[in-house]
Image (spheres, rainbow, N blue to C red):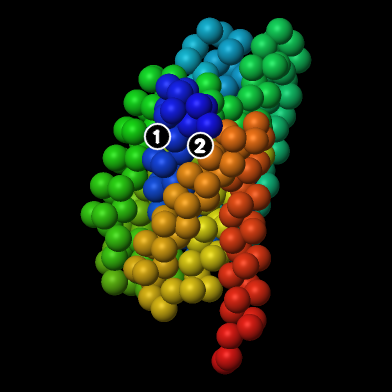
Amino acid sequence: MEILFSDFFQRALAGGLLIGITAPLIGVFLVLRRLSMIGDTLAHVTIAGVALGFLTGFYPLGAGLIFAVAASFAIEKLRKAYKSYAELSIAIIMSGGVALASLFFTLGKGYNADVMSYLFGSIYTLDNMDLIVVGLVTIAVVVVVTLFFKEFFLLSFEEDAASVSGLPVKLLNMLITILTALVISTAIKIVGSLLVSALLTIPVAISLLLSRSFKSSVILSVIIAEIAVVGGLVVAGIWNLAPGATIVLLLIALLALTLIGKKGLPA
């Protein structure tokens, strides 16, 4: 139990709670726009940036963030070029991210073990700089979502109607994609690039089953994410388990219980 009061665990808890706010806040708009897979795409690109950061001596999380934001611009450009096949943009960028990551892995074999921590998550190694970056991203996400909540809501349900009503659709699309890139690039050290999309989508999936309004689904998805983060970290800390995997498995368990509960309720 002493681990729960250690400095590194407290930093992990702080970082996890911050990501527990931002991931579902952005995830709800991605799910409604059928762009859930963008999380995996930007996570792979972020890993390429992290690998380059280790290779060049640059702050790895910062390099990953830059790569993710650049990839978000590329995705939006490709989405416009292939309007009828928007999923192509995600497939193309993901392929490029995996290719770059593989290339950087082969160029810097000595740091592969460090990069692996970003693949599977290494929340216990969060330092003060990481917390500052996560904190700044959290503030940015909360402020932007609060200011443009109604616009993002309309864009998520009917992009054409948003355009006709005079909303700056192109700018709003770019804002959502950039915020997604920021959230993912900061979340990969917490749950890992292979699991990061779970924090974006599973809390939203649960909230959509339980909520009766869009606003309540947003609030509930954040609450669910925070429960999973705190519960997963405590369980992982006590029983010496992988924290990222424990958080995601707890989310899946909550989803399964919700589905069972909904099935058992009268229509």
Q: Earlier in the sequence, mark 2 or mark 1?
A: 1
Quadrant of res 19? top left
Between 26 and 172, the one lying in front of the other is 26
Tag 2 and tag 1, C-beta contact below 8 Å: no
Three-letter code, disc 1:
Ala
Up-down relation of residue 4 to residue 177 (above or below): above
The disc placed on residue 130 is none
Residue at 63% from the left image edge and 83% from the top image edge:
264
Three-letter code, disc 2:
Ala
Residue for badge 1: 14
Q: Secondary structure at mark 2?
A: helix
Between 258 and 79, the one lying in front of the other is 258
Quadrant of res 134? top left
Residue at 46% from the left image edge and 38% from the top image edge:
16
The disc placed on residue 187 is 2
Give the image location of residue 77, x and y in percent: 50, 46
Residue at 61% from the left image edge and 63% from the top image edge:
255
Mark toward the viewer: 2 or 1: 1
Give the image location of residue 133, x and y in percent: 38, 27
